[in-house]
Image (cartoon, rainbow, N blue to C red):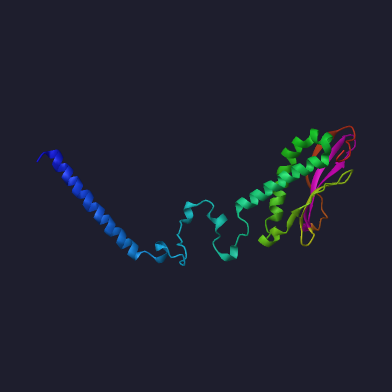
Amino acid sequence: MPLMKRGLLISSALLTLSFFASNEYMKDVQAQAPAKLQGDSSEKPLIYKVNEDSYDLFHAVLPSSTEQYIHRHVSSVDVYTDYVLHYAFEQGKIKFGPTISSKISTSFEEEILPRLKQVVTETTAGLTSEEWKQIKLSTHPASGLGEKIFHLYNEESGNDLIRFHVRRDQPPKQGYWFNFHYHTYVDNYEKHHNLGSIYWGKDMPPRWMA
């Protein structure tokens, strides 16, 4: 018998044997498989163990014990804080009005908001998931000479967590400055916590929202 024909016959026999063996193997696996794998939806889904060292965010997503339960994982904190900063920028532009905004909006974004981010992160770090559901942002900055930009507050109690304000300063012979600061419930809003100042110029600035 030619070598090529003999090879084809051997290959065909091996494939046939492999096919039947595979079928028999699958029947055995299915017979031994749990009901969930055979279509019974009443079984609980399988839970796989993972190696803690293989995941950088393991502790951020899955704490080591229920006593250390994390109400909000890292990514959601960052998303919310970024939203607050975007909101602060938009509320600031509304408060400043077009004249002031055109001159200080870049400094406001680059110098003041990064400091505000740290304050928001630290102030809200201990909130529970239920408290987070009640957190709101005020919608009306103060016009004229008022200081308010926005307040972060608890809707149910009505209490402010953070009051983000700006004040007009005129140090002797130094022109006009805008001082950004905040007040917090931690000290009952009594202290003036400085975030930084932006120089306006020698001439008196227009009123807010002008």
Start-end of magenta stretch? 160-186
Residue at image position (84%, 34%) is: 99
Q: Position of residue 114 (x, y in %)?
A: 70, 43
x and y percentages locating residue 138 in the rendered image: 79, 51
Quadrant of the snapshot with the N terminus: top left
Q: Is residue 16 above or below residue 104?
A: below
Relative horizontal placement of residue 41, taking residue 84 as reference (left or right): left
Residue depicted at x 79% and y 35%: 104
Which quadrant of the figure has residue 96? Answer: top right
Q: Is residue 196 among the parts visible in the rendering?
A: no
Answer left or right for 89 relative to 38: right
Magenta residue check for 70: no
Give how far across and how far down residue 198 sits, in percent: 80, 37
78 over 106 or under it: above or below: below
| Residue appearing at x 63%, y 57% in the figure | 72
Quadrant in which the C terminus is drawn:
top right
The answer to whether residue 98 of the structure is visible from this angle is: yes
Image: 26 above or below 148? below
* Residue closest to the eye, 28 or 117: 28
Q: In the displayed structure, does residue 48 sit left or right of residue 89?
A: left
Q: Position of residue 121 (x, y in %)?
A: 68, 51
Q: Is residue 74 left or right of residue 110?
A: left
Q: Main secondary structure of the magenta part?
A: strand
Task: Give the quadrant of residue 153.
Answer: bottom right
